[in-house]
C-alpha cells in the first residue's frame, strides 16, 4: 500500500539519546521513511535532523502534555491525509509506514515496536498503545487533540 503522497511522518526527539544510538537510529529511520515527507520536532537545531525534512524547534518546558502540543503543531503543518508519529527511542520497519491506513474516524497503533530506554541501558518489545506507534487521519487527529486541550487546557 505504498503511497508517499498520503502520509507525513512526524519525528519527535528530545535530543537526549546516546550518540551511538542516534547514529544507528537515524540510519534505520531513513531506511524506513523512504520518500515520505517528514516534520521534525526537536529541542535544538541539528543539521542531521534538518536533512529529514521541515523542522520545528520545541522551546516549551518538557512535559507529557507538551508532546501532545508539539504533535498538534506538527500535524497542522502536514499536507497529507494521514500522519504517523516516530520517536527517537523506537525502531521502525518500512512496513510500519506502508502497510496500513486507519479509517477516517479512528487512530491506529502498531502494537509491535522496539524501544530503547535512555534512562537505563535496556530495550524492549512491548505490545501496547503508544504515540510512538500512532498512525491517524490528519484532520481526525487535529480534532481530537484540540478537543483534549479544550477540556484539559
Image (cartoon, helix red, strand yellow):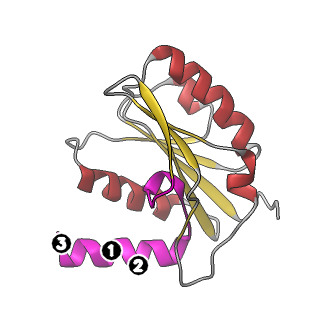
Q: Residues within 10 Å of mark 1 (few under 14, many from 20)?
A: some
Q: Considering the numbered disc 2 on the image, is that residue within a helix, a strand or a loop?
A: helix
Quick check: is 104 in the magenta stretch?
no
Q: Residue at x 36, y 34 (%)?
A: 14
Contact, CB < 8 Å: mark 2 with mark 1?
A: yes
Q: Residue at x 55, y 58 (%)?
A: 111
On screen, 26 above or below 111? above
Q: CA distance from mark 2 to mark 1?
A: 5 Å
Q: Nearer the viewer, residue 129 or 33?
A: 129
Q: Is residue 150 left or right of residue 21?
A: left
On screen, 21 above or below 63? above
Q: Considering the numbered disc 3 on the image, is that residue within a helix, a strand or a loop?
A: loop
Name the outermost residue toward the top: 20
Q: Position of residue 134 (x, y in %)?
A: 52, 60
Looking at the figure, which quarter contains the C terminus?
Answer: bottom left
What mark, if any, has residue 143 been given in the picture? 2
Region rendered in magenta: 127-153
Q: CA distance from mark 1 to mark 3?
A: 10 Å
Q: Nearer the viewer, residue 29 or 44?
A: 29
Amino acid at each position: 500500500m505504498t503511497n508517499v503522497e498520503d502520509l507525513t511522518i512526524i519525528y519527535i526527539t528530545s535530543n537526549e539519546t546516546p550518540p551511538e544510538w542516534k547514529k544507528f537510529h537515524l540510519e534505520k529511520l531513513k531506511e524506513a521513511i523512504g520518500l515520505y515527507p517528514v516534520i521534525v520536532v526537536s529541542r535544538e537545531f541539528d543539521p542531521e535532523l534538518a536533512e529529514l525534512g521541515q523542522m520545528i524547534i520545541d522551546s516549551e518546558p518538557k512535559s507529557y502534555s507538551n508532546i501532545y502540543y508539539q504533535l498538534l503543531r506538527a500535524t497542522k503543518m502536514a499536507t497529507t491525509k494521514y500522519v504517523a508519529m516516530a520517536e527517537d527511542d523506537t525502531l521502525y520497519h518500512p512496513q510500519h509506514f506502508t502497510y496500513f491506513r486507519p479509517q477516517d474516524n479512528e487512530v491506529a497503533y502498531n502494537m509491535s515496536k522496539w524501544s530503547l530506554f535512555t534512562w537505563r541501558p535496556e530495550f524492549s518489545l512491548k505490545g501496547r498503545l503508544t504515540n510512538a506507534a500512532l498512525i491517524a487521519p490528519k484532520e481526525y487527529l487535529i480534532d481530537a487533540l484540540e478537543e483534549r486541550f479544550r477540556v484539559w487546557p
